[in-house]
Image (cartoon, grey):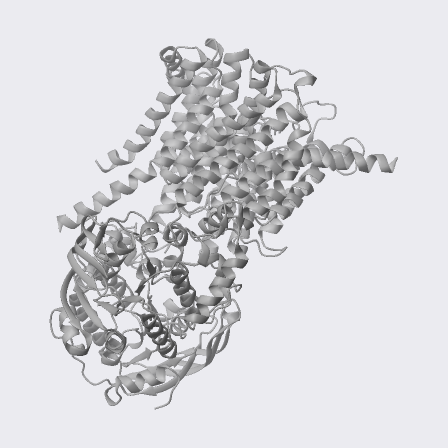
Amino acid sequence: MKYFRHLLFPMIAIVAAFVVGAIVILLIGDDPIYTYQLLIGSALSWPDGIGYTLFYATPLIFTGLAVAVSLRCGLLNIGAEGQLTVAALATAWTGITFGNLPAWILIPLACMAAIAAGAVWAAVPGILKAKFGSHEVINTIMMNFIAAGVASALTQSYFKEPGDPILQTRPISVAAHIPRLGQLFSFIPERIPTNVAFVLALLACVFVYLFLWRTKWGYEIRATGENPKAAEYGGVSVRKQIVLAMAVSGGLAGMVAINEVLGYRYRYYQGFSPQYGFTGIAVALLGRNHPAGVLLAAMFFGALTRGGLFVDIFTENVSKDLVLVLQALVILFVAAEALFRGQFVKRRIAKGVKAS
Amino acid sequence: MRGIVSLAIIYSTIRLATPLLLAAMGGLFTERSGVINIALEGLMLAGAFTSATVTHYAANPWIGLLGGVAAGVFIASIHAIACIRFEANQVVTGTAINILMLGVPTLLSGALFGTTGSTPQIPQTELIPNAPVVIAFVLVPSLWYLLYRTPFGLRLRAVGENPEAADTAGISVRRVRYTAVLMSGALAAIGGAYLSIGQSSLFTRNMTAGRGYIALAALIFGKWRPVQTMLACLLFGFAEAASIQMQGVTPYVRVEYIQIIPYVLTMVVLAGFIGASRAPKALGQAYRKEM
Amino acid sequence: MLELRNISKRFGHVLANDRLNISVRTGTIHAIVGENGAGKSTAMRIAYGFYAADEGEVLVDGKSYTFTTPHQAIALGIGMVHQHFMLVESMTVIENIILGAEPGSFAALDLAGAGKRIRALSQEFHLDIDPDALIEDLSVGQQQRVELLKALYRDARILILDEPTAVLTPAEVVEFFHILRRMREQGKTVIIITHKLDEVLAISDEVTVMRDGRVVGRRTTKETNAAELARLMVGRDVLLRVEKGAAHPGTPVLRVRNLGMTAAAGARRLVSVSFEVKAGEIVGIAGVEGNGQTELIEALAGLVDPIRLTGEVEFEGRNITGCTVRQRKELGIAHVPEDRHRRGLLLDSDVAENSILGVHFREPAVSRPSLVMLNEAGIRRRAQDVIRDFDVRPPNPDLPARALSGGNQQKLVIGREFGLPPKLLLVSQPTRGVDIGAIEFIHRKLIGLRDGGCAILLVSAELEEVTALADRLLVIYHGKIAGEVEPGRVTNEEIGLMMTGGRV
C-alpha cells in the first residue's frame, strides 16, 4: 500500500506528459491515437519489441542509478555523459591493448576499466566540491566537454584505423566480446542486441539498494544528502561522502561502456551516446532515486526509444524527437510535483500524530 | 601577413563571443535574482529556430528577430513558472527545457518543412549579421547601469542575496524573479537568433552545440558581474577563434586541446584559484514565506 | 494610537493568535511580553502587514485597516525591526535602507540625497552610522541601528521592535535604551516584544502579557513587578527548582589549556580559555549570546578546523585537539547541539534512523562480522530504548522526526547522545523551544547523568537554567573566561556584571 503513493505521482507526470504530447502531435498534423498505438505497440511486441526495449533500457539503468546515487547525497551529477565517454574509451583501449589475454581475464579487466574511468572522471568534480565548495553542476558540465574533446583527440592520435573517415577506434579483440542474450538462451533470437550487460544492470540495481540502505556507508551518504550539518555533527565526514558518492555515481555511469563497447559496437565510436547522461536524470527523477523505480523508469524510457523509431518511420510528420519532448515533459512534471509532495508529507504527519 | 591574421582573429573573436555574451547577460539577470538558469542552451535554440522560421515566412529578419524573442520569452516562462510557482529544482527544470528544445524544433521543422531539423536556407539579403553584435556590446554598460544605479537593479540584487529582506521591504520576490527569467529568455533568444539568421543562414538541429552552457561558465568566470562576464565571453570566443585558425595548421597540438582550455579555466576559477567566486547568496533556493 | 481588535491567526493546526485585543497609546514605550511561542511576533507582524489576520482588525488612530502588504503599514507610519535582521550583507547601509523606498526616478537612484538624509537622521537619534559602510563590516549592535534607521527613514511614527536586546551586550543595551528614550522624546511610539522582564521594568511605560496566543493581562509598568508579570506569562509561580543533590566530582576528564580560536574572517572568537571539567560534575557557561560559547562547544566537539585553533584540549589525559568528530565520539564525547533542527536531526528520516546518528558505524547499528552491513533489529532495539527511556512521544520509530514536537525532538536527540554512553557531554541550550513538562524531564536526566559519573559542560542563555543546574559556573565574555563562581553564592546581578566585563 505504501508503494502506491510512490507510484502515483510518477504516473500522473507520465499521463500529463502524454496529454501535452498529444497536443503537440495534433499541431504537427498527425493522429495522436495512432501515434501512441505505434509507440507502445512496437515497444511491447515479442521478441523484437521487448528485446530492443531492454537493450535501450540498459544504459539508462546505469545512468539512472548514477544520478540517483548522487542525488541521495544531495549532489546532481550532470556529468554522466562525460563519465561514460571516458569509460568507453578506456574500455576500448583495454580491449585493444590487452587483446591477447584470454576472455576470462580480459572481460573483467575491461569492465573494471570502465568502472574505474567513470569513477575517476566523476571524482574530480567531487573533490573540487569537497575541497573548494565549487558547484558540481558546472564542473560536471565542463568535464563533459573536456571528455568529448580529449576522447576525440586521443582516438584520432592513437586508436583510429589509419584512413578511417569515421571517428572511432580500432575494434577490440574478440576475446573481449560479451555474448548477446540470444547466444545464451535459445528462446531469444540472436539478432536482438540485448546482452549480458543487461544482467549486470539488474545486479547493479540490487547493489545500489544494498549499498544505500543496508550499509553504514550508504547511511552516511543519505544522511549527508538529507542534512549535511546534522551529518557532520554526527561524526560523518561530509567531504568524504561527497567524493565517495560521486565516485560510485561515476562508476555506475561508466558501466554503460560495458554494454556499448563490449556488447554492441566492439569499439569506441565518437558520439555513440544519444544523451544517455541527461536522460539518466529523467530516469532518476521518475524513479524517485530508488533502484526499483530507476529500473521501471529506465524500461519505460527504453520503450519510448524503441517506439520512437517506429513512429519516426511510420508516421507522416512525427519524428523520433517526439520521444525527447515526452522525456522533457516528464521531467518538468515530476520536478513540479515536488510541491504537491510537500502537502502530502504534512498530511502524513497529521495522521501519525493522531495515531498516538 | 601577421597583421591580417590578428585582425581576422579579433573579428572572429567578437563574432564568436556575441551569442555567448547575449546569453550570459540574460543569465546574469536570472542568477543575480537568485534563479539558476541552466536553460540558456534551450532558450538560445528556441530563439534560433523561431527566428529562422519566421524570417523565412516573413522574408524580414527583424520580424524574425522579434519572433525569436517572443519564443525565448515563452519558453522562459515555463522555466519561471516551474521554478518560482512550483518551486521545482531549478537545475532539473533547466535541463528539461534543454532536452525539450532538442526535440521540439525537429518536430516542428518536420511538420512545416518536411525536414529533420533544418529550416530552409535564407537569402543573404535577409540576414542581420551586425545588429546583434552591437546589441550585445551595448548591453554591457546598460546592464551595469541598470544593475547598480536604478531601483530595479537594487531590488534585483537584494532578491538574489536575501529574499526575505526584500520581502520585508515590500518587494515582490516573485515578480522580480519572473521579470528576470523572462528577460533572460529574450536575451538568450537574440543570441540564438544571431546564430541562425546572423552568422549563418538557417537553423540546424542542436546548432548551439553547448554555447548556452559556455555562457553560464563565462558568467561564473566573470563572477556575476557585467564587465567581467563580457571579458570572459571574449576569452572564450578567442579560444574558439584560435582553435579554428589552428585547424590543419599545426598537427603537433590537436585542436581539441585548445578547445578545452576555456572549460578547464572555468573549473579553475570556480575552485577559487583566481580570486573568490561569490555567487548571489540566495542562488538556487526557492523562496517561500516562513512562519 | 495603535490597536489590535479581536485578531486571530492560524497557521495550519496552530492557533497562533486567539482573539487578541491590544492597545498602545501614542508616545509611549509599550512592552509585549510572553514566552517563546506565545504569539507576540505573529501579532505584531499582522500589525505590520507582513501577515494577514484571519479575523479581526487593526486600528491606527481610530481608523480600521486591513493590511495585505507592509507597504500599507509603512505608509501609515508603522515600522518594524525583526529579531533576525533583514539586511543584505554585501550591500551598503544606504542601499539597505532605501530598498523598497528608493529615491530618485525609475531610471536613476539618488544615492547622494539618500545619504544626506540618513546622516541627518543618524545624528538626530544619536545612532552614529556611516551610510557608505558595508553591512558585513558592521557589528551586530550597529546593524541593529541600521534597522532602526530603515524605519525612521520611512517616517515611522510607531516602531515595533522584536526581541531587540537578544543580540546586544549589556553595555549596548544601555545605549539602546537611551536611543529609545530619545525616540519617545521625539514623539515616536515604541513597541518592544520581549521575554526579558528586567528590561521591561527598566524601559517600558505599559505592558501587555501574552500566553498561548491570548492576551492575559495589561499593566502600567510602574504599578507591577517581575513576579506578577512572570506569573501571568507562565500561569503559575515560576521559580526554576531543580532537585539537585550535591555533586561528587572525581578526576578531571576534560582539560582546556589556553584555547584560542580565530574565525574565518580573522576575528578572535576565543582567547586563552582554560578550565577543567571533572567526572560527576556539571560546569555551566554563562554569557550573553555571541561571546564565544557556541565556538567553544564546537571546538570541543571537533567541528572546528584545527588550523584555526591554538592551545590544547585534553581528554582523559590525551591530547585531542586535532581529533575529528568521529574520533571524539569513539572516545566518549557526546554533543547536544544548540540547533536541533539544523544540526541535530535528519528531519525527513524516521526516528529509528535518527536514533543511531553518530553511532551508526558500530554495534548495535551494524552487525558482525563485516561491521559494514546495517543491523535492522539492532537499530530498532536502540530506537525503542531511546523512546522508552526518554519518553519520546508518539512512541513510533517509523515516524519522520519532523512529526515530533520540539520537546520530543529534543528528548530524542538527548536520548541518542546519552546512549553513547558519554564520559563527557557537551550540551548547548538544552531546553530552547521546549515545553515545561519536557524541560523538567530533561533537567532531571542531566542531573541523573551527572550522578552516574559523567562530566557535563552546559551552555545556556537562560541564566536561571544554568545557575540552577551547574555545580560550578564560568562566565564568558568576549571569548575569555571572565571568572568562575559558585552558583549558590552569587547573585544574578553579580553574574550579569561579569558577563559585561565588570569585576565582582
Using the image, determine if residue C196 lies above or below residue C69: below
Q: Furthest-right residue in view?
A: B1
Residue at horizontal 23 percent and vertical 38 percent from the top = A2
Number of numbered discs overlaid on the protein picture: 0
Q: Does residue C239 appear to the left or right of A291 in the view shown?
A: left
Q: Furthest-left residue in view?
A: C236
Using the image, determine if residue C271 lies above or below residue B4: below
Q: Position of residue C264 (x, y in %)?
A: 51, 66
Q: State which quadrant residue A151 falls in.
A: top right
Residue situated in front as seen by the camera: C355 or B122: B122
Is residue A66 visible in the rendered structure shown here?
Answer: no
Q: Position of residue A228 (x, y in %)?
A: 40, 55
Q: Does residue A186 appear to the left or right of B54 in the view shown?
A: left
Q: Position of residue A89 (x, y in %)?
A: 61, 35
Pick the quarter of the image with the N terminus of chain A.
top left
Q: Does residue C403 appear to the left or right of A83 in the view shown?
A: left
Residue situated in front as seen by the camera: B75 or C326: B75
Is residue C460 visible in the rendered structure shown here?
Answer: yes
Q: Position of residue A231 (x, y in %)?
A: 38, 57
Q: Does residue B277 appear to the left or right of C297 in the view shown?
A: right
Q: State which quadrant residue C45 falls in.
A: bottom left
Residue situated in front as seen by the camera: C72 or C297: C72
Residue at horizontal 32 percent and vertical 50 percent from the top = C72
Q: State which quadrant residue C175 falls in.
A: bottom left
Residue at horizontal 71 percent and vertical 39 percent from the top = B238
